Image (cartoon, grey):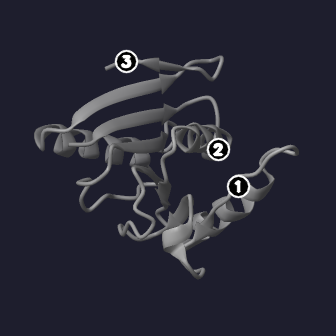
Amino acid sequence: MADVLFYHLTESTLEDALPGLLERSIDRGWRAVVQTGTEERRDALDQHLWTFRDDSFLAHATDREAHPAEQPILLTTSDANPNQAQIRFLVDGAAPADLAGYERAVFLFDGHDTAQVEGARMHWKVLKEAGHAVTYWQQMPDRRWERKA
């Protein structure tokens, strides 16, 4: 069973929070897949990860490009895992089909978006009932994460 983390964004945007989490995943030696709710969001994150910081970028590709299996970070709208990622990020209401084979799944949801909050609650309930170890992390005013459950 995968560890499932729910990150409740209240102080920063997905674009602010995701790159740091991806960097930590890569530092662990993990491959990552980021599943978005729409192709538009996938494409916007694709551009953002190349330019999010002047002194850094995250090597990645989208599922539209050749050789997805070779990518350390793959951005997709599907529930496939072509790069054999150990960690799956789900954003903008994306829903997982099956978390078997992942060490960790991370739901990032906007605390100012009622639909995303309700979706996270539903996923929490389903995944907890399925036997996954679930934890809830809320962003504090200083943008640090505090475990709440």
Report the residue at 33% width, 48% height from top. 119
**Badge 3 is on which residue?**
148
Q: Is residue 86 left or right of residue 71?
A: left
Depth check: 32 or 48 in front?
A: 32
Q: Secondary structure at mark 2?
A: helix
Q: Which mark is residue 39?
A: none
Confirm or deny contact between disc 2 and disc 1 (CB under 8 A): yes
Q: Is residue 75 above or below residue 134?
A: below
> Of label 3 and label 2, which has the lower sequence position?
2
Q: At which x and y percent is residue 27?
A: 58, 39
Q: Is residue 13 left or right of residue 94?
A: right
Comparing 125 with 89, the one in front is 89
User: Residue farthest to the right?
Assistant: 54
Amino acid carrying label 2: it is: Pro
Nearer to us: label 3 or label 2: 2
Per the model, the C-alpha gap separating discs 1 and 3 is 29 Å
Q: Residues within 10 Å of mark 2 (few under 14, many from 20)?
A: some
Q: Closer to the N terminus: mark 1 or mark 3?
A: 1
* Amino acid type assigned to the residue bearing label 1 in the image: Leu
Q: CA distance from mark 2 to mark 1?
A: 7 Å
The N terminus is located in which quarter?
Answer: top left
Sequence-wise, the earlier of marks 2 and 1 is 2
Cα distance in 3D space between marks 3 and 2: 23 Å
Residue under numbered circle 1: 49
- Number of the label disc, if any, that sits on residue 19: 2
Q: Nearer the viewer, residue 147 or 64?
A: 64
